[in-house]
Image (spheres, rainbow, N blue to C red):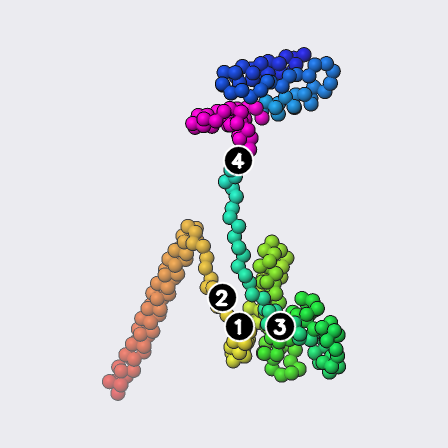
Amino acid sequence: MFLKKTMKLTAVILRTWNLFSGVKLGNVMPMRHGHGSWGGVFNANLSWMVTHAIRSSMVRNQIRDGCNQPAEVANNEALTIQPVRHYARAVQKKQEFQSQLQDLPPSMLKLEFATVPLAHTVDDVVKRLLSLELGSHRDKLRLKEEQLIAKVQRDENDRSSTEVKVAVLTARIRNFQEHLQKHPKDKANKRWMLMSTDQRKKLLKFLRRTHYDAFEKVCHELDITYTFPPEYCRRATRRWLAKKALCIKVFKEVQKQKAEQRNKMKQAQEKAEASSTTPTNAQETAV
């Protein structure tokens, strides 16, 4: 009973408010009488009241702004107005990233069939099956690795030198970069790329320290820009600055004490030498 009376009172208040507002929005939705689900009736009336309140406020705003159209036309137009969403962002075009596999022609045979003489004499259909046109990305990547290895290897049978390892890592790193451009949220791919980059950096550092000519050749052939590691930089906090000033002060005091001790030892040695020379001079004069 209390809920029923409350809903009736709300309907009366809304009807009175619509009358005083000067806008004809229709009759208030009547209450259901008799038996039924009062939860559904309450939700329906509540949604209806919210909808009519929004419509009436939009119509009043249009009338206040100088709209001379009738109330019903303004009401219908108000229903078609969509809210402006200010959080929408402009679509940004992604920069085109050139793949390292673009220079591989589709007619090139796969790596395992390139050394087979019979593969060059077959018909076009079979050659197409054996070529990169129908090959996977893995086949193209293996062929690119072999091309980079051929540029820096020491001889034909060289497969384990530092230069060859750098070439293989370079092909993999560029492949990871291409994948990361298309799928920037792939964290595992980013982790593998960073690990491979660190490993290649260590190999280049070792090659630069042991064989500088080979290091320059590898960087030139593989188009690698070697950057020196940054110098050690520590955040200058107040505690660290105070500690550093104290250490410098202690160091200067220690150096000062050591200098005084050296001066005393030097003076003592000079006195000892002077005392040792005076008796010999006295003996010489006596003789």
Name the residue: 65% across, 78% down: 159
Name the residue: 65% across, 69% down: 141
Which element carries disc 3, helix, strand or loop? loop
Q: Residues within 10 Å of mark 1 (few under 14, many from 20)?
A: few
Give the quadrant of the C terminus.
bottom left
73 within the magenta span: yes
Of callouts 3 and 2, the N-terminal one:
3
Of callouts 2 and 4, the N-terminal one:
4
Give the quadrant of the N terminus.
top right
Disc 1 or disc 2, which is closer to the eye? 1
Q: Which residues are magenta?
A: 51-80
Q: Which residue is mark 1?
A: 223
Amino acid type at circle 2 is Pro
Position of 242 with respect to 206 (left or right) is: left
> Farthest residue toward the bottom?
287
Query: How far apart are the two marked residues, 1 and 2, measured between alpha carbons?
Result: 19 Å
Of callouts 1 and 2, the N-terminal one:
1
